[in-house]
Image: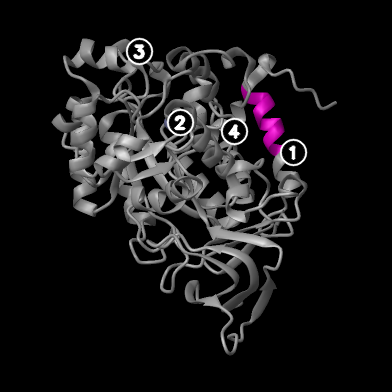
Amino acid sequence: MLRSLLIRDIHTLVLMDPANTVLRHAYLYIEDGEIRQVGTRPAKLPRADRTISGRYAVAVPGLVNTHHHLFQTLTRACPAAADAELFDWLRTLYPLWARLDEESVHVAALAGMAELLLSGCTTTTDHHYLFPRGHSRLIDAEIEAARRIGIRFHPTRGSMSVGKSKGGLPPDSVVQSESRILADCERLIRQYHDPAPGSMLRIALAPCSPFSVSPELMRATAALAGRYNVRLHTHLAETRDEEAYCLNRFGKRPLDLLEDVGWLNANTWLAHGIWFNRREVARLGRAGVGIAHCPTSNMRLGSGSAPVLALRRAGCPVGLGVDGSASNDSSHMLAEARQALLMHRLIHGAAALNVADTLRMATVGGARCLGRDDIGSLEAGKRGDVALFDLRDVGYSGAGDAVSALLLCAPTRVSTLVVEGRVVVEDGELKTISLDPVLARHRRLAARMQGPSNTMDWK
Ligand code: ZN
């Protein structure tokens, strides 16, 4: 086991520190997973168990993905749901997802995590909320995948308890009883949650959405999270349909419902947050609620655009999320950052959002959403999570500035990726697992799940 790693002669190194420092000809020294030294031209470089050259690379802190549903890699580009908005998209896909089991969740997680790692992402969350009867160990299956592949992981124990017969959106076959949900949340925290600095695994609790759980479950989940000091996550204000559902069923707007169940505080981060009005943005900022902004999914489903510039100004931590692989349909974090930049420039003008601020959302902002101050920037004392992109790639050829090129040029595959001081990707290839057999299995499982609607034929 290597204890120390030196990356030397880095062409351009983005620290993402408060001063937005960018270094040329820099080096980074990591020991026992922690960054010990970073800078330029020292009198003497530290000696390390392993040394890598960064001569042709632009290096950034490992990207942080704040919202995802890894199982949905099995229903990417599903023809039946290709052109639907959220509620119809969900109604079409729930019956397919009802076929999930431990094997398919494990393989889907490996495929999605591989895609994330290769796009520069070193920390991801996942929101798994669908537990078909008889399959209660699905979070365990994705934790096993994260350990195998070497990604820093924040799985959230999702839940759905209000099925169609009780006025919810999902079919009854995929919802669970609230007592069972809470017992499993507690089991997962006790079994896996590691609150220590440098942690590779933290659990959060995540009832799915206002249209699939009860306010009682939201309240009980908040109480449980408080008892164990873990974070809270849910979908909120994603679509107009959700807003209409909340007004209709609870007589409240989504944010009032959130406050009512004890979630309007800095322990919570929300996926989407599109349909907040100006007063609600100010309330969220005062409360310090985090927002996982998912621009591609929001555009793909035609859900709307989140007021993330206003949310940031109001004081909310804002991170980026690739969201479910069936509503994106990708797990490429660098592409997501580019999408965020382009989306808000389209709406607010080219000066509204620059490359540095977008990268900040993809790194430090995401880390804050997950409640972490030990990742997201490359400073002494932080964890050794680094993504290096090769500036010799055809897509960067002719670029005048290495940092701008990352988001203005086409998103590429990472060349080297380091997680907790460990080289997980080298020369653009995963070192921790053999990807081809995983993808062959993944394609077979996807074909089985999608059934006759899947038109991909490998024979
Ligand atoms: Zn989602």
Q: Which residue is mark 3?
A: 164
* Whether the residue under disc 1 has CB within 8 Å of ligand 1: no
Q: Residues within 10 Å of mark 2 (few under 14, many from 20)?
A: few
Which stretch appears magenta?
440-449
Q: CA distance from mark 4 to mark 1?
A: 13 Å
Quarter of the render that holds ligand 1: top left
In the displayed structure image, the side of residue 224 where residue 188 appears, left or right? right
In the displayed structure image, the side of residue 108 where residue 205 appears, left or right? left
- Which mark lies nearer to you, 4 or 1? 4
Q: CA distance from mark 3 to mark 4?
A: 25 Å
Q: Residues within 10 Å of mark 3 (few under 14, many from 20)?
A: some
Q: Is residue 243 magenta?
A: no
- Which mark lies nearer to you, 2 or 4? 2
Q: Identify which residue, 85 or 452, lies in the foreground.
A: 85
Q: Which residue is mark 2?
A: 349
Q: Which residue is mark 4?
A: 73
| Residue 11 percent coordinates (x, y) | 65, 66
Q: Secondary structure at mark 3?
A: helix
Q: CA distance from mark 3 to mark 2?
A: 43 Å
Q: Which residue is mark 1?
A: 440
> Total number of numbered labels?
4
Of the residues under marks 2 and 4, which one precedes in the sequence? 4
Q: Are marks 4 and 1 in contact (CB under 8 Å)?
A: no
